[in-house]
Amino acid sequence: MTSAAIRNAFLDFFRSKGHLIVPSAPIVVKNDPTLMFTNAGMNQFKDYFLGNKQAPSPRIADTQKCLRVSGKHNDLEEVGVDTYHHTMFEMLGNWSFGDYFKKEAIEWSWELLTSVLNIPKDRLYVTVFEGDEKEGLPKDEEAANEWKKWINEDRILLGNKKDNFWEMGDTGPCGPCTEIHVDTRTEDERKQVDGKNLVNADHPQVIEIWNNVFIQFNRLKDGSLQPLPAKHVDTGMGFERLVRVLQEKQSNYDTDVFTGTISKIEEITNNKYGFSDTKTDIAFRVLADHIRAISFTIADGQLPSNTGAGYVIRRILRRAVRYYYSYLNYQQPLLHQLLPVIATQFESVFPELKQQESFVTRVIKEEEEAFLRTLGKGIETLNEIISYFKDFPVYPISNPVTPKSPMPTVIKELTEVNSGISLFSGDSESLHKTISGKISFILYDRYGFPFDLIRLIVRENNFDVNEVEFNAEMQKQKERSRAATAIDTEDWIIVNEGSSNEFVGYDSLETKAQVL
Ligand code: ATP
Ligand code: MG
Ligand code: MG
Ligand code: MG
């Protein structure tokens, strides 16, 4: 089944169950102070849940463009490193606004997955909320009983509040959820851990695909729960993950959602993609992922800029540039060349991209060019630093000799100039120099120079760079910017009222991938 056919199968199925199919809301949220980007299918239906507006139909389904790169849901660090978290993804969803509840939601999700899409039943696990006495939350016996009609009891696992209870904030509508996980391990792998039930946290090939939330309580200010008069269903299924399961792949990037883009990157850069953990393969995945997030967000009206949502997009774009620059050995604007592939691929489902293809291409190309110039300047500065360091004679540092060339400003700016050069162990003949993490952090901060790239260049010159110190500087920056990222901490409640939307703390989120 092609991905397009899978998307249609989902929508057709819920249409046949009386759902109104609606278009995706824009990925960019313009009128909500709590949210920069749509991060779940239900965002656009918030007013129906709160009773502020009447839903056009009590049953709705759609595919929603989502972006999870900030606030409560920030998956950026995983993207490209793992094979199933994306920045932008499609969330397939079905909703009941005061209409059907657990019985139908569970029955239909089972019917769709096992009878329509033919996922083998022995590949599925479900989780239900175990309850939380301290919080006064009951176990979701009702959902467990519904599941027992369809699936063996040993495949119904209990989940805690973090994974299996949804709250919109400290007060308001909330309720338990049940999640569906698919075991995509090979037969051999399954035999090795025979008999052991796994959910996605335990094995990278056992992945969560679908979350069904049952909104049945209203949490009051005093913390107590009141049953809601009208109960709702809110579900979200990761489209790319579903396609991976149905196309029997080990990675979302091996499905037809991404293979077109990956081939194009192979063709442009003359590298080969091979589904491994190498930096080259991660770079392929990062590019194939990020180009979607960048393009769809621009098409929905958010240009890259220095503040707020625009800054988030700019940084995603720069992260992609750094990956191709460093690991695909490609130093020309690349991302914009991928536009024709995705604009055409998504034309029938999200036509807005094809309609603005040349505009989006131009914006991305200009961003890439500007950033590549900055990176170029960073490299020049680094070369200056390296040649200055080369002028230092062999130690001891207690008896320093004035280097022949003038000190680059970037080093001058540091008060502790000499601590920027530290000794490694070894005798005086084999000593080598380590460039301080503080200097490399300045390069990173000012020119967007990724640490890995700094290290690469430095090592080519027989120096090293102090990673521990670099990480410490990064940590300090993270603390400085933490307050500024307080936005987007919930699905939709108002946080940090009165503060500005300016978003300044993003770099710090990317330390794990170490490519910024
Ligand atoms: P995970 O635990 O894998 O991060 P989640 O519990 O955060 O997922 P939900 O908020 O329950 O995800 O969203 C509903 C569904 O959306 C998930 O079951 C999953 O299939 C999909 N999904 C969530 N985050 C991503 C992502 N970053 N990329 C692709 N699909 C995602
Ligand atoms: Mg998540
Ligand atoms: Mg989860
Ligand atoms: Mg979930």
Image: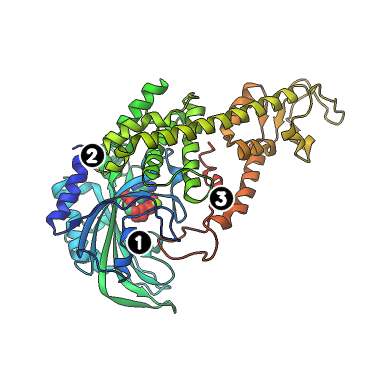
Please tell me in which quadrant of the rendered image residue 424 appears.
top right
Cα–Cα span, label 1 and label 3: 32 Å
**Residue lying at 40% horizontally and 60% vertically, measured from the top left:** 491
- Specify whether 302 is left or right of 1: right
Q: Position of residue 208 (x, y in %)?
A: 32, 50
Q: Nearer the viewer, mark 1 or mark 2?
A: 2
* Cβ atoms under marks 3 and 2 closer than 8 Å: no
Residue 234, numbered label: none
**Residue lying at 31% horizontally and 35% vertically, measured from the top left:** 342
Please tell me in which quadrant of the rendered image residue 145 appears.
bottom left
- Specify whether 137 is left or right of 346: right
- Badge 3 marks a residue whose secondary structure is loop
* Cβ atoms under marks 1 and 2 closer than 8 Å: no
Q: Quickly name the residue at label 2.
A: 3
Task: Give the residue type at disc 3.
Answer: Val
Nearest the eye: 495 or 336: 336
Nearest the eye: 405 or 279: 405
Cα–Cα span, label 3 and label 2: 37 Å
Q: Position of residue 482 (x, y in %)?
A: 57, 55
Task: Give the residue type at disc 2.
Answer: Ser
- State which tag comes first along the sequence, 3 or 2: 2
Residue 164, numbered label: 1
Query: 274 above or below 91?
Result: above
Q: Position of residue 379 (x, y in %)?
A: 62, 27
Mark 2 burial class by Cα count in 10 Å: few <14, some 14-19, many 20+:
some
Which quarter of the rendered picture does the C terminus lie within? top right
Task: Give the residue type at disc 1.
Answer: Asn
Q: Nearer the viewer, mark 3 or mark 2?
A: 3
